[in-house]
């Protein structure tokens, strides 16, 4: 009987030691929280403000970024510096699949990090997870707000390389030079050229590998984990849309040529006027 009590006490003591050690280890790491102040309105301003007010009361470094998509394209050095400075990085942003692939796509070396999805979690749930899962105590945050003037369109594609089958359908479907494709590599080379309200390349992807993080919906296309249900594609409408897009492509090219010709003619006319004035 005494032996069983000793074993129970020892087991409980070991549990407490393990819990204390784990919590202490989390606290000993230099930690930061990166909050994406999303300008694409994927969550409401009220929810963003609630999360932000809660983060200000946490004993941790907090970076409020306006916003993460823009920084991943235009301020890579800032993100890489944060990645090197902190051992524990918690991103409060949208879907983890979207965030991880976006950082990877843009060459951001963050090492190990976690994402708390503010599309699915409430402000209170996020703050609770910071305490229970990451050892962040209440206190006063070392708070920084950073912004970039880059205007990122709402339609901003990210490739999930693990799911991509290199079929090239998205690159062929896109009118605006967002992708490059050579049968061995598919890359987003000009994400800012993507046109708003045109997620067609993502909807036609058979592997659900195209993500639009700034899409204000809770879906695989916005970065949710793909399940058994694929994004539906009406093949009849798709064929009609493809034909329409090919026609649009030709019209756009013709329009671009005409605009360039008009500009060249305008410049030539100005030069002619200057030449005439000099002769007078």
Image: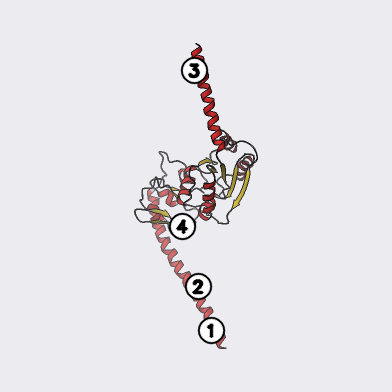
Q: State the image coordinates of residue 218 (x, y, percent, origin top left).
A: 50, 42
First in sequence, mark 1 or 4: give its number: 4
Mark toward the viewer: 1 or 2: 1
- Give the structural element (helix, strand or loop) at label 2: helix
Name the one closer to the observer, 178 or 54: 54
First in sequence, mark 3 or 1: give its number: 3
Q: Residues within 10 Å of mark 4 (few under 14, many from 20)?
A: some
Q: CA distance from mark 1 to mark 2?
A: 18 Å
Name the one closer to the observer, 204 or 186: 186
Q: CA distance from mark 2 to mark 4?
A: 25 Å
Which residue has dot 2 on it?
263
Query: Residue shown at 52%/47% (left/top)?
Result: 84
Q: CA distance from mark 2 to mark 3?
A: 87 Å
Which residue has dot 4 on it?
190
Mark toward the viewer: 2 or 3: 3
Extreme-left residue of the structure: 183
Question: Does residue 253 sit above or below 219 in this rendering?
Answer: below
Q: In the rendered structure, are the residues bearing label 3 and label 1 in contact, judged by CB atoms less than 8 Å apart?
A: no
């Amino acid at each position: 009987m005494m032996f069983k009590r000793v074993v129970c006490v020892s087991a409980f003591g070991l549990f407490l030691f393990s819990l204390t050690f784990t919590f202490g280890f989390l606290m000993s790491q230099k930690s930061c929280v990166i909050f994406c102040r999303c300008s694409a309105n994927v969550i409401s301003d009220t929810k963003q403000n609630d999360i932000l007010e809660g983060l200000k009361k946490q004993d941790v470094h907090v970076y409020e970024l306006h916003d993460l998509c823009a920084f991943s394209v235009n301020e890579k050095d800032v993100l890489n510096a944060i990645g090197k400075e902190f051992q524990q990085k918690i991103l409060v942003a949208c879907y983890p699949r979207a965030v991880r692939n976006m950082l990877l796509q843009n060459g951001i070396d963050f090492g190990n990090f976690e994402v708390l999805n503010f599309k699915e979690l409430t402000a209170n749930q996020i703050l609770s997870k910071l305490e229970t899962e990451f050892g962040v105590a209440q206190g006063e945050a070392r708070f920084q707000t950073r912004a970039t003037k880059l205007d990122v369109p709402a339609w901003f594609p990210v490739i999930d390389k693990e799911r991509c089958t290199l079929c090239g359908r998205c690159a062929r479907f896109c009118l605006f030079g967002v992708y490059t494709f050579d049968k061995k590599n598919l890359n987003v080379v000009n994400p800012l050229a993507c046109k708003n309200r045109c997620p067609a390349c993502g909807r036609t992807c058979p592997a659900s590998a195209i993500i639009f993080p700034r899409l204000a919906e809770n879906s695989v296309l916005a970065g949710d984990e793909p399940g058994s249900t694929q994004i539906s594609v009406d093949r009849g409408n798709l064929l009609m849309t493809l034909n329409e897009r090919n026609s649009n492509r030709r019209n756009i090219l013709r329009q671009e040529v005409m605009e360039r010709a008009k500009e060249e003619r305008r410049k030539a006319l100005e030069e002619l006027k200057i030449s005439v004035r000099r002769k007078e």
